[in-house]
Amino acid sequence: MAIFMDMEKSLIVISVFFFAAFVKGITGLGFSTICLPFLAMTLGIKETLPLLIVPSLLSNILVMVDAGHFRSTLARFWPLFVSALPGIPVGLALLAWIEPRIAGAALGFVLIAFCAFSLARPEMKLPANLERPLGPPVGIVTGVINGLTGVQVIPVLPYLLSLPLSPNHLIQAINCWATLSGAIMAIGLAKLGPMTWDRFLMSAIGLVPVYAGVKLGNRARRWLPPETFGKAVLLLLALMGATLIDRLL
């Protein structure tokens, strides 16, 4: 049965989209990163990834327009962005080849690593002479992890945080990366089969709860402490990552 005609699955997807957007509105945490474990545990990772394409791309583009510094960011980080081109197809090929439970466990490990990094917030400073040489390897590795698990921020987020970037430059760089990788993921998923019309429609329908969730989250930020709430969500994501690993073991 097509997923957008399956009422139970549709309600799960819409609820998760709303919750992830609500959390993003409060804390700024990535929409896809929050959605992934909830939907992967219910639908499977291969079925989940196509559902995240449309809302993720739209939210990234909106942030890019608002952040500014697009040309300077593109000029500085184009080797990092271009390196996604081979990395993501390799990750998608691995996703199509390996057993779903192994892919879910890989997602679990990446989620735990992301949560540990976000909670620890280590002080890092990359020497200026290493920025360019490390860009392509970081991009390739992030692309492979992105294609395999759907997570777009490891290790590219620690790499960007270790550079002397203003907040708007950092936001622009992350969203340029996420937009490019999302577009490549959409093409790859369509080629491999998981991106079907019914999943695309479900993804597009999800824009409504995403918009409502972000708006409500922005308002809730006034009475919910973002840092405390964000830590609670990260701990929940880490727990779900451990559950995905446990399913394999």
Image: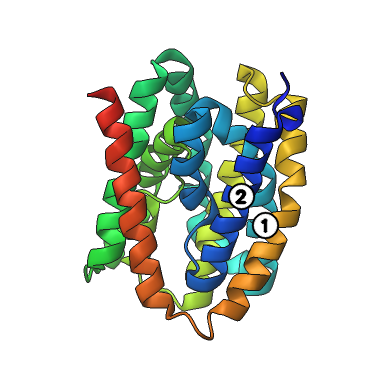
The x, y position of residue 77, in whole percent, is 49, 57
Q: Earlier in the sequence, mark 1 or mark 2?
A: 2
Q: Quadrant of residue 192?
A: top right
Which amino acid, by three-letter code, is at mark 2?
Ser
6 to the left or right of 237: right
Say which residue appears at 51% left-offset and 64% top-offset.
23
Near-viewer residue (162 or 21): 21
Q: Which residue is mark 2?
A: 15
Q: Quadrant of residue 242?
A: top left
33 to the left or right of 10: left
Residue at the far front: name it.
8
Label 1: how many residues lie within 10 Å, few (<14), some (14-19) or many (20+)?
many
151 to the left or right of 7: left
Q: Name the disc covering residue 47, or none.
A: none
Which structural element holds mark 1?
Answer: helix
Q: Which residue is mark 1?
A: 210
Near-viewer residue (20 or 142): 20
